[in-house]
Amino acid sequence: MAVEATLQSLHSTVSALAPVQLAVLGALAFVVAAFVGRVVYRNLPGKQPPILEGVPYIGGLLKFAGGPWKLMEEGYSTKGEVFTVPVAHKRVTFLIGPDVAPHFFKATDEELSQTEVYNFNVPTFGKGVVYDVDQKVRTEQFRFFTEALKKERLRKYVPQFATEAEAYFSRWGDSGVVDLKQEFSTLVALTAARTLLGREIREQLFDQVADLLHDLDDGMRPISVFFPYLPTAFHKKRDEARVKMGQIFAKVIQARRASPVKEEDVLQQFCDARYQNVEGGRQLTEEEITGLLIAVLFAGQHTSSITSAWTGIFMINSKDKDLAAAVQEQSEIMARHGPGLDMDVLGEMDVLHRNITEALRLHPPLLLVMRYAKQGFSVTTAKGQTYNVPAGDIVAASPNFAHVLPSVFDRPLAYEPDRFAAPREEDKKKPFSFIGFGGGRHACIGQNFAYLQIKAIWSVLLRSFDFELLDPVPDADYDSMVIGPKACRVKYTRRKLQPARA
Ligand code: HEM
C-alpha cells in the first residue's frame, strides 16, 4: 500500500510539471545515468586503456604525423599491448600481439565494423559495392569473391600465371640489372589482367586500362583516407578514370553476356553470379561488376607484387642457404614432374612457400588493419590486465609490429624461413601470431591465389636465372599506402636448371 501511495503521489507530481520542467528533469536524469554508467564501466573488472598523447588534443595527431611505426614503438614500450591515441575528437586504440588480437579478428560486423574505417575506398571502387553497401549485400559480394577464388577456379588460373611469367622473363636479356619491385609490378598487373579482368582486357585493352588504374591508384593517397572527396587534381583524375573504367567494362560485360563462350576468369564468374538472399536474386549490374573487379585488383595487385619482391630480395641476400635450398627444391620437383607447372606441382614447393611467408612476416604490405567499435569490449593482456575499449573507438592491429615481437618469434628481425617448419612452427603457438593475411572473420580471400601467383613467378625465375644483390637489403618505404621495398638493384644471369638426379 505504501508503495502504491508513493507511486500515486509521484504520478500526480510528474503530471503537474510543465513540459519544459519535464525536459530539464529528463536531461538531468540522462546526465546522471551517463555519469553513473561511466563510473560503473570504469570500475568493471578492467579500466580503459592507457592514453598515449603528450600535448593534449593535438598530441595524438603529432604522434601520427611522426609516422605510425614510431608511434607504435613508443606506445608498446611505454604502455604495453593496448593503448589509445586520441586524434582530435577521435580515439584510435591499438591492440598489439596475439594475446589481445582474438576479438579484433573474430568479432561480428555488428561489434567491429569495417565500413566506417574503409569507406574512403568508395570513390575508387564506385557506388553500390563493398564499403558503399549494407552488411547483407556486402556479405553476398564477398561470397562472389570467395566463389571466384576457390580451389577449382584457382586450378584454371595457374597455367595463366605460368604463361604470363614465362613470356615476361623471356624478354629479359642474357644478363642485366633490374629493380624487382618495378618488374613484379608490371608482371602482376599482366597476370591480374588475364585472370581477374579477363582476356579482352589483357589482349586488347591492357594499356588503356593500365593507365586508368594508374590514375585510380594515384588518387588514393594518405590524405584521401581522411578526406576522400577533397577537391584536388589527383582526386579529379581518379573520378574521371573511374567513369572511363565503367564505360570500358560495360561494353566487355555486354559482349560476354551475349556470347555462348564461357571464359576461365573472375570476370566470367561475376557476369554469371546472382545475389541469393538480397536484391531479389538478380544478376550484378555492369557498374557493380566493374566496382568488384577494381576492389579485387586493389586488394591483390600491390600486396602480391611487393611480397614477390621482398621474397626475392631476402632469398638472394641469403644466396648460399635459402636461395640454394629453393633452387634445389625446383630441380627435385622437375625431376619428379618435368618442367610443367600446375596447382599440385606448386603445392609441393614447401621451401619456396616458407620463403614467401617469412618475407611477408618481416614486411607485410598492410601496416594497419582497422575496425570501428560499434560496441564496447574488453581485452586481457598477456600479463592479465583487463582493459575496456569503449564503443566509438577506432581499433587497429598492425601485422608489421605484431610480426617482430620477440615474445612470439625467435630472433624476430632475422630472415629464417624454417621458423614456419616443424619443429619450430612459431606461428602455430598462439592463434593470430602471423597476420600477414589478416585472420578470422575477414581473413584475406585471395591468400591462396597470392601464394600460387608468387610461387609461379619465382618458380620460373629460379629455374632460369642466377641472381646477385647489388645493393644491401633496402628499407621499407613507409610513405606509400601499401608498403614495399625502396629501390634495390638485382643482377640476373640466364641459365637453364637441370632436373635433379635420382
Ligand atoms: C601477398 C598478397 C596479399 C596480402 C599480404 C593480403 C593481405 C590481406 C589482409 C591483411 C587482409 C585483411 C584486411 C582486414 O582485416 O581489414 C586482406 C583481405 C582481403 N584480401 Fe588480401 N592480401 C593479398 C592478396 C590478395 C589477393 C591476390 C586478393 C584477390 C585476388 C585479395 C583479396 C582480399 C579480399 C577480397 C579481402 C577482404 C576480406 C574481408 O574483408 O572479408 N588479397 N588481405
Image (cartoon, rainbow, N blue to C red):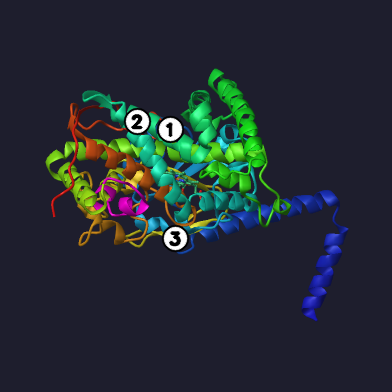
Numbered tag placed on residue 420 in the rendering: none
Q: Decide: few, some or many residues near mark 1? Use Cα within 10 Å; few <14, some 14-19, many ≥20.
A: many
Question: Can the viewer see residue 452?
Answer: yes
Q: What kind of residue is marked 2?
A: Tyr
Q: Position of residue 7 (x, y in %)?
A: 80, 71
**What residue lies at 64% left-to-right and 53% top-to-bottom?**
136
Name of the residue lying farthest toward the bottom = 1
Q: Position of residue 44 (x, y in %)?
A: 49, 63
Dots 2, 3 in contact, CB < 8 A: no
Query: Is ligand 1 less than 8 Å from the beta carbon at label 3?
Result: no
> Of discs 1 and 2, which sits in the foreground?
2
Which residue is the site of mark 3? 46
**What residue lies at 33% left-to-right and 43% top-to-bottom?**
456
Numbered tag placed on residue 168 in the rendering: 2
- Prevalent SS, magenta region: helix
Which residue is the site of mark 1? 190
Check disc 3 and report its element: helix, strand or loop: loop
Cα–Cα gap, marks 3 and 1: 52 Å
Does residue 8 appear left or right of residue 228 in this picture? right
Dots 1, 2 in contact, CB < 8 A: yes
The magenta segment: 339-353
Viewer-proximal residue among 360 and 374: 360
Q: Is 451 located above or below residue 477 in the figure? A: below
